[in-house]
Amino acid sequence: MTPIGRLFHSIGIFILKRRIGQLIALFFRTVASLFDKSHNFKSDARNIIMQTYFTGVEIFIPLFIVATLFGTVVIINVLMRLDALGFSNNIGSLMVVVIIRELSPILTAFLIAGRSGSSLTTYIGGMVIDSEVDALATMGINPIRYLVMPSVIGGTIATIIMNIIFSASAIGAGFIVIKGIIYLTSILHNLPIHVSLNLSNLQISWDYLSTEILKALTKWDFFLAIIKPLVFGIIITVNACYQALNIKRDIRQVPKATSRSVITSFLYIVFADVALSLFYFISYMNTLSTII
Amino acid sequence: MLDEALRLEDIYLSTSELSGTLFSVPRAVSYFENIRSSESNADYQLIAGANLRLKLGETICIGGPSGKGKSAILRMIAGLARPLKGHIYYFGEYIPAERLDALEIAKRNVGYVLQNAALISNLRVADNIALPLHYHKMGSDEEISKKVNMAMDLMRVRNFANMFPHELSVGMQKRVAIARSWAMDPKLLLMDEPTAGLDNYNRRNLLPLIDNMRTMFKTSIIIVTHDLMIAKDLDCNLVFLHKKKLTEPHSFDYWLHSDSEISKDQFRDLQSISPNT
């Protein structure tokens, strides 16, 4: 090898020896496996739809409950604090920042990492232990294509859809829950309903809330509502598959790998979230410079 | 050479290569050059300096005491474990170490029947056999289903086509695994303990099938087994793994009557019941 070749070779080996390098390598191999010679659209589509169903539909109820309750808490706090401070015309932008930008992608990703990421690790890890992955490879079936690729694509699609559902149900169902709370308190304290509305600073209508939120949405929000869950979904599924494929032939390693997969997914998601928040920072600086 | 199916030259294999899968583990380009020195970790070495040559259409049995790396050799030939040192030729073609993995070797029509069958547990028996055929698009749907039915008929598992692997016994799983490998038309078939867990009736059914494969399809077969009578029934050569090396191939009768240490260990019972001695 030439000296330059040796330099690049040692850099490559250095990166590939690290876990993050192997994760990125696995991601690229997953993408590359899409263009394998032996692609079979029908069975691939079936696997991907199964994975999307498994990741998305079966997590719907816990996700809906979490979204609704978090939405309620955020709306209550935003309305009461902002009214007290006298910024009641900023309700929409604050809701957008808290729910659509931050809470929804992160909590969706955490829920999916805790449920689908962990089950993906146990599923593939069990196959590794039973040497089914070896059997696939000796039959010429690329395990990355057969197992990892449908999980990554299906999991990512499900994360994107679930993120939209989370945002919608946090605002929509959260609003309904608030109305219910107001109604209940007025019954409990034997007050006419308009009195209790006025007392609690919660006299918002759906018209007002939705127009405020729609006004506050920028093109960056729509863009990142797709990009963030896309990145998080890829992180969760690739990390889960990576942890599973690296299990040594020992059944006790499966639960260890599962917990490691969930915890490291959480970590990577938060790091990626910080990195993606730079988009907002850039757009903020742009608007600031136009104002100045 | 054109008439050879497999050639192993001076193979070294260590136990540390056997754990885990080979996926997402990096491999240096100059893997073979900077091998750890072979003397320093002698304790971990399973195989040191093994040589083997298999002609096309030839069948060979590998015997030897358990725990000495017979299955490890098969795993290595199938590409699931990397040798520390040495050269492997498939059908006269040398595959360098950095490309030596199971997918690359499977492209060269090498089939492998694992010791524990390793059927995909969420697929039914028929789907298990059809899976590689569908993946590699070996024919239309009718052709594939015909082929699957033929494989199931051969191994007598047709009645269990709609069952899941966990509903079958170990011996039945093994027959399904052999059917799955057979359906792929391998040119070199590696079998790890094919008769373990099979009753006498099915064992007697399996042996003509193996015989058929090598006469009709010119399949080269390597069988790792404790059941040395297979070598006699198939009339093939026996190789023993002895002192981390593979011995020269010799016929069953040669080993039976030879005076070597291996014969004394492995053929003691057979010698006493054999009428010739």
Image (cartoon, coloured by chain):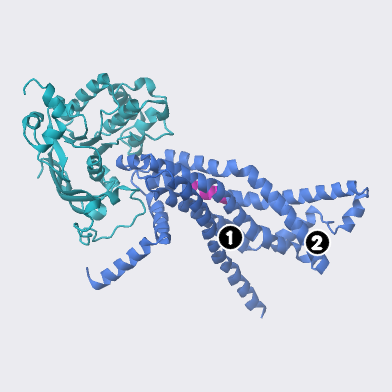
Chain colours: A blue, B cyan
Question: Looking at the picture, do discs 1 and 2 lie on one chain?
Answer: yes
The alpha-carbon separation of the residues under discs 1 and 2 comes to 28 Å
- x, y percent for residue B18: 30, 47
Q: Nearer the viewer, residue B199 or A80?
A: B199
How many residues crowd around disc 2 within 10 Å: few (fewer than 14), some, or many (20 or more)?
A: some
The answer to which quarter of the image holds residue B277 is top left
Q: Residue at coordinates 14% horizontally, 30% vertically from top-left?
A: B267
Which amino acid, by three-letter code, is at mark 1?
Leu
Mark 1 or 2, closer to the camera: 2
Q: Residue at coordinates 38% horizontally, 24% vertically from top-left?
A: B161
- x, y percent for residue A92: 73, 61
- x, y percent for residue A54: 54, 41
Whether residue A250 can be seen here: yes
Task: Identify the residue under disc 1.
Answer: A224
In the rendered structure, the answer to whether residue B1 lies left or right of residue B36 reads left
Q: Is residue B68 above or below residue A108?
A: above
Q: Which mark is residue B52?
A: none
Which amino acid, by three-letter code, is at mark 2?
Met
Q: Is residue A155 magenta?
A: yes
Q: Which structural element holds mark 1? A: helix
Range drawn in magenta:
A153-159
- x, y percent for residue B45: 22, 50
Chain ID, mark 1? A
Q: Residue at coordinates 70% horizontally, 49% vertically from top-left?
A: A68
Q: Which structural element holds mark 2? A: helix
Task: Identify the residue under disc 2.
Answer: A80
Mark 1 or mark 2, earlier in chain: 2
Q: Is residue B59 above or below residue B39?
A: above
The answer to which quarter of the image holds residue B174 is top left
